[in-house]
């Protein structure tokens, strides 16, 4: 796999962000390890585990509003990375903390924890 670890991590996270922006579930699937859940809280503070496939289906449905995203932080420790992403939608922002591991197939997102911030 060509490029530095940081370049490979950015490419993986860009697949995720472009999948959200362009409504392309295949790009989302490419960025994530196959069995990842998305972690968040409901309004009562209970943990909600959403399968990655639900995010892919939402992207493929065309229901996501126009959005932009950016990587705001990258921290790399050997074969592990933490990346913070902000996704800006018309009425809210998602703040994601993504954990990536350097697997035998390359860098993959193995955990996503997010929060929603209303505008």
Image: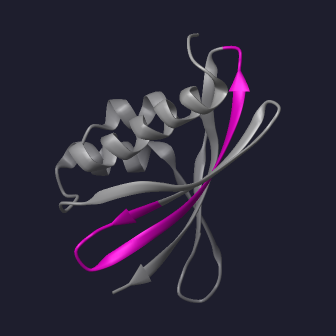
* x, y percent for residue 104: 70, 14
Left or right of 25? Residue 3 is: right
Q: Is residue 33 visible?
A: no
In the image, 68: left or right of 93? left
Residue 30 image point, x, y percent = 45, 28
56, above or below 64, in the image: above
Where residue 38 sits, quadrant-wise, is bottom right
Q: How is the model colour-coded?
A: one colour
Residue 99 magenta: yes
Q: Place residue 110 in its image quadrant.
A: top right
Residue at 25 percent of width and 60 percent of height: 67
Q: Residue at x 39, y 73 (%)?
A: 93
- Image position, residue 96 (x, y; %): 54, 61
The foreground one among 91 and 46 is 91
| Residue at screen point 58% across, 68% down | 40
Q: Residue at x 26, y 49 (%)?
A: 21
Relative image position of residue 109 (x, y in whole percent):
60, 39
Q: Is residue 92 above or below residue 11?
A: below
The quadrant of the picture occupied by the C terminus is: bottom left
* Residue 6 lies in the magenta-colored region: no
Q: Main secondary structure of the magenta part?
A: strand
| Above or below, 38 relative to 18 | below
Residue 70: name its quadrant: bottom left
Q: Start and end of the magenta stretch?
A: 86-104
Comparing 52 with 92, the one in front is 92
Horizontal relation, residue 44 to residue 29: left or right: right
């Amino acid at each position: 796999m060509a490029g530095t670890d940081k370049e490979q991590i950015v490419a993986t996270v860009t697949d995720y962000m472009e999948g959200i922006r362009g409504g392309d579930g295949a790009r989302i699937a490419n960025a994530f390890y196959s069995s990842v859940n998305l972690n968040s809280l409901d309004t009562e503070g209970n943990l909600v585990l959403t399968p990655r496939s639900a995010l892919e289906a939402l992207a493929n449905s065309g229901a996501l509003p126009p959005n932009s995203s950016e990587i705001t932080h990258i921290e790399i420790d050997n074969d592990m990375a933490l990346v913070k992403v902000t996704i800006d939608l018309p009425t809210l922002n998602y703040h994601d903390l993504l954990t990536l591991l350097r697997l035998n197939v390359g860098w993959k997102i193995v955990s996503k924890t997010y929060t929603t911030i209303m505008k």
